[in-house]
Image (cartoon, helix red, strand yellow):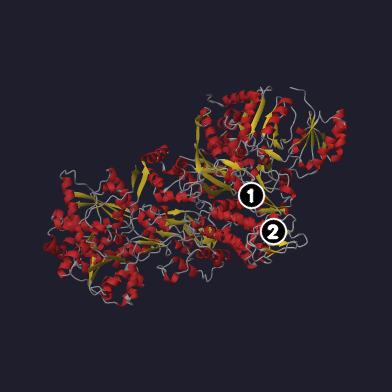
């Protein structure tokens, strides 16, 4: 357990985690699992990805997050390939998830149903 | 990993209102095939880039080159120049007002309609992992406040930022904090109102589920500013996931010393507990919320005294909603002027809306204050479903009113919405199309209010019931023109005399539909017709003789024997027997039965 | 005190900071109508839910109309109380309220005395638009031994709820449901009988409409009077005479003892007696018990528990049986005057006139609704024949007198019959808070010290303060006395007794604020505490005018003991004049 | 006067007491206590309210007043498969009312009722937040999206 004893401690954690989260080598998959996502079956997709990525020997971290707000396209997930911008896919079912693994994660090939970041972020 | 293949992304898709992109995609594929590239280069239909006024847009990877306002005819040039030769098609690149060309998506993103401040981390971080939150700036603002600022300095930044309460009323947040700060007491409370009760609104829930630490941190900052050491989150019990994530977040924050005693070694103590709502919309009103937190019926009481003077347990209490709190940390970190640079003169920052109803892209969006309804509905929202005609957008839920075609280009902010007879409310935005009967919509909202009225004051308890009854009467075709005046008078009196915000705003849906769609009301009471064809009692099923082949299918399916006619002769529906079940219309294969 | 200036209807007035618009307007002679709001100023009772919205006014600069009952004046505030906007709003709100209220005024128990009816009249409502399509919120009617609840007539003023919870801390009533079906009811919307209700009747006393009324027993009384085989006698409680006149247009505080006696006689009662006689008897029994316990206690007898608590008030008895059953050996075992009267009447007096108890009907006129329940308690019956057959309230008596076309104003002053109509001033003051203990002190002092009292007016025991205490010097023994009226105040003293903190030797408790003069069966005060004060003054006036003012000097009491009872607390007295209490707290039964 | 006997099993009494104690018998925690009790017992019958009343020292009338105020609390047991139809605005404009009517018709129930065999209960709720799937029906924990009246019979069949 890390007790944060000062703002400097906080910054240390921040830097460490950022390093870990955004290290260039890692594939990151975020499954959006808020109520809306879960109601549309995001849990199934999450389980599927964890299992299949391991089976297919792809080293990736799969995490659950809240929803992005794309209710019309739930379930959604985001894949960040090393060195690339995150890409969000919508209306993901198992078939699509398989497609995503095979085409995008393995080959960087997009599949239909990409939801580009349609917003600005604060930097 | 394989070398990166070239790919073409085209915005739009089944939900996009701009049908050009479909033809464009087809043309691109044809062009690729013509050049035998269809196996090497993929054409992908993507969702909206948020650049609808530049659409359709085509993005080519690698390189992230963006072409704007691409027509189907441009397919050939894109393939022959860019794909085959690697030359950018200059004329399709975006040129900013100064004439400078921008080709990369990143450069264009400033033109995106949405700006995520509140939703900055939603979908980005694992809400159950505090370290990911910290990696995305969580608690940095708290650290800054605790080590570098005095309470009044924090309050000043919030005041200067122009942040107004996102719960509905739009009261300046900094001012609210200042009042709570000035009321000295041995004990004070910070309350987060997460009792999102608007039907069709789920902004707060998404934030709590996606970024709970943003709220905890902001509450602690508020606590420091008003000199409170205890925070309470009042949340709907119907949000089990949000509750679970909040609980996890609270315990992780305690573990990390970011809540509890001596936060970050600064000597400041602040802890947060959760209180549950139990399904009462009125508990969104702050005095009702406080009573509910005290274990009582959530009945509102007269203000003053305001919670800032006498709130939870009679102590000074500052109540803000989730979205308001979610704005706090960025304001502290980036400064008041950063925040106030976005928005309109009197409404700063962004607003999250839950788009729902007859709109293609149902979901959560966050736009700068001042964005127009047109941009929200037709660009971000992808327009009306099934290509139907836009009729109205209801904002502010049961407390709001509807905006119509004439409001499409009004910048959305607190004051404009109020002037248009609606209100910001918590951010539900329900879109209606030509098939929606506005009398029925008003009735729907009144039904909600009647159910949710606490019953304490007579205008809300009885008056809303009477409004609902009269609307029902009208939708049954029994109303008169005089009833419309009565609707109006009752509405004004209920607004004018009710005890709390619920009753003071509950007639808004009636008044605003009456104002904007009076002809529709009049049709109901004079010619007894529902123009949208929604009101069952005003419908009449009718057989178009020319289309009817006399197959007798309708007569056989009619449960009450209202349809007569000889085989192979046009049939006839007896309206006095017909119960308007619609079975005949479903059965008819010749489109011979219509509703009049 | 800081004062501020406000302008109401173009007139400016200076009021202390914190004054509401409504009160400031009253200072200017502007009577803004109120409905739910109610205040009994001297008793610290205020009901201000700001729920009815009848009293709304226009405050310059405010978006909405403001309820004048709770909105405080601010410096320079400009208020308009009768603009067209205000008048239209007030009328429309009233139409709303009436649209959900039965229109059976003609046969409503509250007719003529109903604040809603009066308001409808004042606002000139002549029709209710849309009534034909307006649903009404309807509820099951509930009749308990004392109180009838007809929630169809409830307007959610919340006065009853406030009385039951804040003032009385009985907690039998609560707002239930929400929205259109919101009402005030006991738990599970069961009958009052199954709730913690003490029948104190304070809810009825403040209800502005016919939603809460008393059970009317006058038809039974009429039937008994019409039965030639029955001898019907009546006893009248002290507080009745100080209030009955109000219902005949007399000023509050007018004593109508003699006229009341004449009226009762005219109604056909065979004997008109006075509960005051039984009050004197109560002092003999309770006073003796006090001295006995006190002496034993002072002599170190641990079984003698102090303080002793008075037990005349049936609402109070119900209260401690419900909430303090663990202390049920603390109150005096003496029955209430009503029941002592019944017990003596059905034995001593029945014998005297030579009839069986079955042929004697005892009617009591009480300021109280709990008395209706009390006389129905099983332990107060012999062979299914009640000691007191019927108890009717001051209001019922007035209605009865009017039905018989008797004008109380024009009656001769009559005299109570003997012997059960003879009383002292000590019996009379039972009607006001502090009176019972003052009467007890007058007797106990002389019995204990063997000396004559030099003064009879113990003003230190009088007043309207909710909890009072005084120490009376019993010739060297300082006797600590506590007084509480209103059950919430009683609860405070009882909690001290329970925790052993109480320093009192004796405590008087009356369930109703003000004592019996403010009872649930009295003419409605409509929120005017001046009325209660006037009634109390009348009680003390009657005491002052009595030739005898100490219970033990009542010759007929002395005779009763000589002829019948022996001495106070004798075995016979115990049998007839004392009772026991029951644990009525809800029990959780474990199912096997 | 009160004369009702409250009958409960000892273990149930103990459970309620345990719940109350976990909130320090604090009357302000009434709503939290009721949530926990309903979570455990499924509903809040009079007996439970009486025990909570004694533990927290709140008049039972007040507890009943609170329970009848909040739509989340119920005094009648829910069915084995509680059916909730979202009546949020998004679902409403996409036809939730017709779906609700169909459930009413199929089950012969009104909102708030439970079938005689205790199998189904019907309720409406405000916005489950799956507006993209409107109209939404929940049976137990399972969510059904884009439900049309014609789907109702099939949904019910799944639970037969």
For label 1, the residue is D150
Residue B480: quadrant of the picture = bottom right
| Between D22 and B192, the one nearer to me in the picture | D22
| Between C545 and D57, the one nearer to me in the picture | D57
Please say if the residues under marks 1 and 2 sit with CB atoms less than 8 Å apart: no
Say whether mark 2 and mark 1 are on the same chain.
no
- For label 1, the SS is helix
- Residue A54 sits above or below residue A88 on the image: above
| Between B213 and B553, the one nearer to me in the picture | B553
Residue C394: quadrant of the picture = bottom left
Please report, as a chain letter, where disc 1 is located.
D
Residue C353 in picture, x, y percent from top left: 16, 70
Residue C548 in picture, x, y percent from top left: 18, 65
Please report, as a chain letter, where disc 2 is located.
B
| Crowd band around label 1 with a 10 angstrom C-alpha radius: few (<14), some (14–19), many (20+) | few
Judged left or right of residue C572, residue B549 is right
| Between B65 and D86, the one nearer to me in the picture | D86
- Residue B540 sits above or below residue B223 on the image: below
- For label 2, the SS is helix
Give the spatial CA distance, label 1 vs label 2.
19 Å
Which residue is drawn at the image coordinates 65% and 55% (left, top)?
A: B421
Judged left or right of residue B214, residue C455 is left
Residue C262 in picture, x, y percent from top left: 26, 74
Which residue is drawn at the image coordinates 66% and 46% (left, top)?
A: B356
Q: Can residue B220 be seen in this view?
A: no
Residue C90 in picture, x, y percent from top left: 53, 64
Judged left or right of residue C73, residue B34 is right
Q: Can residue A26 be seen in this view?
A: yes
Residue B554, labelled with which disc? 2
């Amino acid at each position: 357990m890390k007790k944060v004893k000062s703002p400097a401690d906080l910054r240390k954690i921040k830097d460490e985690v950022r390093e870990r989260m955004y290290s260039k080598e890692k594939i990151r998959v975020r499954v959006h699992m808020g109520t809306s996502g879960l109601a549309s079956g995001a849990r199934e997709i999450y389980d599927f990805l964890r299992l299949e990525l391991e089976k297919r020997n792809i080293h990736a971290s799969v995490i659950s997050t809240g929803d992005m707000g794309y209710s019309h396209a739930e379930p959604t997930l985001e894949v960040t390939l090393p060195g690339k911008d995150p890409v969000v896919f919508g209306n993901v079912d198992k078939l699509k998830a398989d497609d995503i693994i095979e085409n995008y994660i393995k080959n960087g090939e997009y599949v239909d149903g990409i939801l580009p970041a349609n917003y600005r972020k604060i930097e | 990993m394989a070398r990166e293949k070239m790919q073409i992304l085209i915005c739009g898709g089944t939900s996009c209102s701009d049908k050009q992109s479909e033809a464009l995609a087809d043309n691109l594929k044809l062009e690729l095939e013509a050049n035998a590239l269809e196996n090497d280069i993929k054409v992908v239909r993507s969702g909206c880039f948020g650049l609808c006024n530049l659409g359709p847009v085509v993005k080519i990877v690698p390189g992230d080159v963006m072409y704007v306002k691409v027509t189907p005819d441009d397919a050939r040039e894109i393939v022959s120049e860019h794909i085959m030769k690697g030359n950018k098609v200059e004329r399709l690149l975006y040129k900013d007002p100064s004439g400078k060309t921008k080709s990369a998506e990143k450069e264009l993103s400033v033109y995106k309609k949405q700006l995520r401040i509140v939703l900055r981390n939603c979908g980005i971080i694992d809400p159950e992992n505090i370290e990911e939150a910290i990696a995305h700036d969580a608690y940095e603002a708290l650290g800054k406040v605790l080590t570098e600022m005095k309470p009044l300095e924090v309050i000043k930044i919030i005041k200067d930022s122009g942040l107004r309460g996102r719960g509905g009323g739009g009261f300046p947040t900094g001012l609210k904090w200042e009042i709570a700060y000035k009321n000295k007491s041995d004990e004070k409370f910070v309350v987060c109102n997460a009792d999102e009760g608007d039907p069709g609104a789920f902004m707060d829930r998404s934030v709590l589920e996606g970024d709970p630490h943003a709220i905890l941190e902001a509450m602690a900052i508020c606590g420091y500013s008003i000199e409170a050491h205890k925070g309470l989150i009042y949340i709907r019990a119907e949000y089990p996931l949000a509750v679970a994530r909040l609980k996890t977040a609270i315990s992780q924050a305690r573990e990390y010393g970011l809540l509890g005693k001596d936060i970050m070694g600064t000597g400041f103590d602040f802890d947060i507990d959760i209180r549950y709502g139990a399904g009462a919309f009125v508990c969104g009103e702050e005095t009702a919320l406080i009573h509910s937190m005290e274990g009582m019926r959530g009945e509102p009481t007269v203000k003053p005294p305001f919670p800032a003077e006498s709130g939870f347990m009679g102590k000074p209490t500052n109540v803000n909603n989730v979205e308001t709190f979610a704005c706090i940390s960025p304001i502290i970190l980036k400064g008041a002027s950063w925040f106030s640079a976005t928005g309109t003169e009197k409404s700063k920052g962004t607003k999250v809306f839950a788009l729902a109803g007859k709109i293609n892209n149902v979901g959560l969006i966050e736009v700068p204050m001042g964005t127009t309804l047109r941009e929200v509905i037709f660009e971000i929202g992808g327009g009306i479903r099934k290509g139907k005609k836009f009729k109205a957008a209801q904002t502010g839920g049961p407390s709001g009113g509807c905006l119509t075609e004439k409001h499409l280009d009004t910048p959305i902010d607190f004051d404009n919405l109020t002037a248009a007879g609606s209100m910001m409310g918590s951010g539900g935005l329900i879109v209606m199309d030509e098939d929606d009967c506005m009398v029925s919509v008003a009735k729907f909202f009144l039904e909600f209010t009647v159910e949710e009225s606490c019953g304490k004051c007579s205008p809300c308890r009885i008056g809303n019931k009477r409004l609902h009854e009269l609307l029902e009467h009208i939708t049954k075709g029994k109303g008169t023109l005089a009833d419309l005046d009565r609707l109006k008078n009752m509405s004004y009196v209920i607004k004018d005399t009710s005890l709390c915000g619920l009753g003071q705003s509950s007639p808004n849906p009636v008044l605003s539909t009456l104002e904007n769609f009076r002809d529709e009301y009049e049709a109901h009471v004079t010619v007894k017709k529902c123009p949208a064809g929604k009101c069952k009692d005003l419908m009449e099923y009718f057989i178009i003789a020319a289309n009817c082949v006399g197959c007798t299918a309708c007569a056989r399916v009619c449960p009450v024997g209202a349809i007569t006619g000889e085989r192979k002769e046009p049939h006839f529906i007896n309206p006095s027997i017909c119960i308007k079940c619609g079975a005949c219309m479903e059965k008819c294969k010749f489109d011979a039965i219509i509703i009049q | 005190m800081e004062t501020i200036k406000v302008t109401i209807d173009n007139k400016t007035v200076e009021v202390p900071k914190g004054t509401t618009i409504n009160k400031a307007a009253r200072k200017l002679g502007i009577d803004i109508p109120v409905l739910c709001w109610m205040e009994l100023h001297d008793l610290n009772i205020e009901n201000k839910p700001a729920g009815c919205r009848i009293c709304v006014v226009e405050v310059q600069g405010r978006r909405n109309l403001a309820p004048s009952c709770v909105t405080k004046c601010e410096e320079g505030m400009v208020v308009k109380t009768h603009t067209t906007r205000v008048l239209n709003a007030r009328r429309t709100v009233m139409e709303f309220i009436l649209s959900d209220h039965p229109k059976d005024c003609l046969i409503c128990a509250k007719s003529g005395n109903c604040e809603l009816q009066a308001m409808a009249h004042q606002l000139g409502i002549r029709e209710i638009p849309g009534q034909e399509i307006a649903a009404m919120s309807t509820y099951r009617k509930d009749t308990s031994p004392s109180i009838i609840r007809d929630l169809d007539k409830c307007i959610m003023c919340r006065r009853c709820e406030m009385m039951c919870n804040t003032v009385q801390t009985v907690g039998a009533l609560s707002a239930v449901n929400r929205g259109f079906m919101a009402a005030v009811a006991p738990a599970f919307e069961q009958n009052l009988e199954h709730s913690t209700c003490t029948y104190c009747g304070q809810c009825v006393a403040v209800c502005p409409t016919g939603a809460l009324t008393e059970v009317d027993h006058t038809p039974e009384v009429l039937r008994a009077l019409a039965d030639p085989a029955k001898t019907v006698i009546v006893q009248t409680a002290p507080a009745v005479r100080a209030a009955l006149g109000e219902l005949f247009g007399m000023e509050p505080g007018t004593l109508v003892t003699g006229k009341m006696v004449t009226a009762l006689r005219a109604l056909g009662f065979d004997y008109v007696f006075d509960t005051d006689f039984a009050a004197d008897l109560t002092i003999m029994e309770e006073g003796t018990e006090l001295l006995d316990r006190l002496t034993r206690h002072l002599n170190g007898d641990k079984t003698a528990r102090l303080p002793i608590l008075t037990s005349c008030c049936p609402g109070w008895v119900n209260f401690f049986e419900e909430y303090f059953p663990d202390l049920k050996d603390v109150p005096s075992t003496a029955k209430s005057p009503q029941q002592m009267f019944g017990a003596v009447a059905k034995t001593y007096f029945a014998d005297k006139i030579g009839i069986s108890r079955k042929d004697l009907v005892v009617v009591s006129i009480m300021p109280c609704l709990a008395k209706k329940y009390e006389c129905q308690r099983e332990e107060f019956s012999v062979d299914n024949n009640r000691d007191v057959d019927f108890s009717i309230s001051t209001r019922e008596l007035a209605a009865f007198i009017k039905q018989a076309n008797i004008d109380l104003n024009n009656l001769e002053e009559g005299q109570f019959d003997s012997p059960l109509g003879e009383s002292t001033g000590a019996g009379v003051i039972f009607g006001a808070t502090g009176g019972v203990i003052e009467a007890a002190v007058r007797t106990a002092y002389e019995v204990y010290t063997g000396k004559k009292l030099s003064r009879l007016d113990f003003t230190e025991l009088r007043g309207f303060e909710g909890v009072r205490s005084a120490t009376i010097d019993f010739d060297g023994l300082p006797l600590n006395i506590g007084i509480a009226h209103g059950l919430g105040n009683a609860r405070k003293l009882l909690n001290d007794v329970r925790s052993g903190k109480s320093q009192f030797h004796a405590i008087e408790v009356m369930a109703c604020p003000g004592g019996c003069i403010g009872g649930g069966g009295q003419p409605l005060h409509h929120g005017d505490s001046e009325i209660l004060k006037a009634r109390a003054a009348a009680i003390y006036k009657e005491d002052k005018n009595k030739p005898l003012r100490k219970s033990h000097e009542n010759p007929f009491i002395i005779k009763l003991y000589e002829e019948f009872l022996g001495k106070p607390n004798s075995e016979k007295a115990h049998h007839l004049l004392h009772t026991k209490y029951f644990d009525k707290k809800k029990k959780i039964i474990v199912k096997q | 006067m009160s004369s009702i006997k409250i009958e409960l099993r000892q273990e149930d009494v103990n459970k309620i007491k345990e719940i109350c104690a976990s909130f320090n018998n604090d009357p302000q925690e009434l709503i939290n206590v009721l949530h926990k009790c309903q979570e455990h017992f499924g509903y809040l019958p009079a007996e439970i309210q009486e025990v909570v009343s004694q533990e927290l020292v709140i008049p039972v009338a007040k507890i009943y007043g609170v329970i009848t105020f909040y739509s989340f609390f119920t005094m009648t047991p829910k069915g084995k498969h509680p059916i909730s139809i979202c009546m949020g605005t998004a679902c409403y404009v996409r036809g939730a009312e017709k779906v609700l009517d169909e459930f009413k018709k199929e089950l012969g129930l009104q909102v708030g009722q439970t079938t005689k065999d205790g199998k189904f209960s019907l309720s409406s709720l405000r916005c489950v937040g799956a507006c993209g799937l409107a109209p939404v029906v929940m049976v137990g924990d399972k969510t059904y999206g884009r439900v049309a009246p014609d789907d109702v019979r099939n949904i019910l069949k799944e639970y037969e």
